[in-house]
Every structure is written in C-alpha cells, then in structure tokens.
Amino acid sequence: MLRGERYSKRVNDSRELAGRVVAVRSPSGYATESGPHRLERGQLDVVIVIDGLPLTDLPDGARLHVGATAVLALIASPGTGSIASSSEAEVSGLLETSSPGLVRAEVVDPGEVTVGDAVEIGAVSVPITDVLDLHSFRPDETQPVVVAYLAEARRTGLEEVRIVHGRGRGIQRALIRRVLGGIPGVAGFADAPPTRGGWGATIVRLRPTAGSESR
C-alpha cells in the first residue's frame, strides 16, 4: 500500500541494499530452526531474524525477496503500524538484529527460507505528490503501482497528477492508458504539454472522493 510519506531512498537505490537471514524461530522464541522452513501464503507464522537491512525504516507495503522464491510484504497492525513490541507473546514477524521491534509481515509468494538466505528489497512505497515517475519501477510493477498511487492521490485530495512513463516506443504509454481507462476514479487523461514532458508523460484528472466532495 502506498503511503503519503517520503521514503528516504529511491527504489532503484533500495535494491542495492541486501541482508541475510541469521535465524528462523517460533513466535514464542524458544525453538530455533536450523533446516529449511516452508512459508505458506498468508500471515508469517515464524520470527525471521535478518541482518543488514533497516527493516524498521521500511514503509508498510514494502516487499522483501527471501531466498530463491519467497516474497514477504510488510503489513500494518491495527493502530500501531507495522512495528510491534518483541516482548508481546506469540507474535511472528521480521526482526532486525539491531532493533528490538518486530516488523509484521505476510507471505505473498510461498517458498522455503533457511539461515543464510539472502534478503533483498523489492517494491517500496513512493511519495504521494502530484508526480509519479515510473522509471524507478520494473515493467511488471507498473500496473499495481499506478492503481495504488491514484487511489492514494484521490484519498489525499489531489485533483490532477502527472505520470511520467517516458517516450521510447510508446509501449509504456499504451499500457498506462489501458490501466487508466479501467479506473473509475479517473475523470480523464491526456498527453502532458511540451513543458511538462509531452507524450513522455500523461496528465490524469481525478474524480473527488466522497469525503473530499463534502469539504
């Protein structure tokens, strides 16, 4: 989920960060597993201790690639955000070696995790401003990022935003147009004027949400 806060690192910079699993243990903390542990889709059922990544600095919705196949997403706890006290009984999540706070997570893609596995940051939140630059995202991230960004932009009251997709051969532009055409909250869209990117960017007009209409 996109959040209206600035994350201190750009997405392509964050991919250079990598950590490593140093322990996998039960939520109670008494049993430590030495062999592979199978992660199934849904809320994380163990505590995974990770060294080398600033887990508590990552925003809700950030994704972590663990080992060869497993993908985890940070999730928020009701009223507390993603960080929970590690002293709370029977709590699972991710634990940074240099921090006492557990970070809640869910398994997006199942897979096995074991001590020594590499952990890399995948998709992270983007700042909610009136510009979304897609150059930092992989092609397979484009559609969900645009949909989530526009939903959050409407929620924060933005009436018009600019999506920068680049010129190239027009493939990205065409994809964005197809996505925009299927979003009810979009009132209209067109190429940006030459001074704002021309056909390398798209201006999107947003319908107000019910809450913003009453203000």
Image: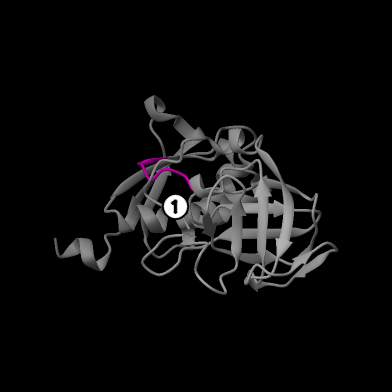
Find residue 181 and report its horizontal and vertical position in percent: 48, 59
Local crowd size for mark 1, using a 10 Å CA cut-off: few (<14), some (14–19), many (≥20): many
- Residue 129: within the magenta? yes
Q: Which residue was labeled with disc 1?
A: 149
Q: Is 118 on the left or on the right of 89, as rendered?
A: right
Residue 8's place in the image compared with 155, above or below, is above
Find residue 97 and report its horizontal and vertical position in percent: 62, 48
Residue that protrudes farthest toward the left in the picture: 215
Residue at the image point whose x is 60% and y is 55% from the top:
95
Q: Amino acid at mark 1?
A: Tyr
- Would you say residue 198 is visible in this rendering? yes
Residue at the image point whose x is 28% and y is 64% from the top:
209
Q: Determine which quarter of the picture holds residue 152.
A: bottom left
Find residue 65 and report its horizontal and vertical position in percent: 70, 52
Q: Is 37 on the left or on the right of 146, as rendered?
A: right
Say how the picture is coloured.
Answer: one colour
Q: Determine which quarter of the picture holds residue 39.
A: bottom right
Residue at the image point whose x is 40% and y is 70% from the top:
78
For the C terminus, the quadrant is bottom left
Q: Nearer the viewer, residue 68 or 197?
A: 68
Residue that protrudes farthest toward the top in the picture: 195
Overall secondary structure of the magenta section: loop
Residue at the image point whose x is 37% and y is 49% from the top:
4
Residue that protrudes farthest toward the right in the picture: 35
Find residue 191 and report its horizontal and vertical position in percent: 43, 39
Residues in magenta?
A: 125-131
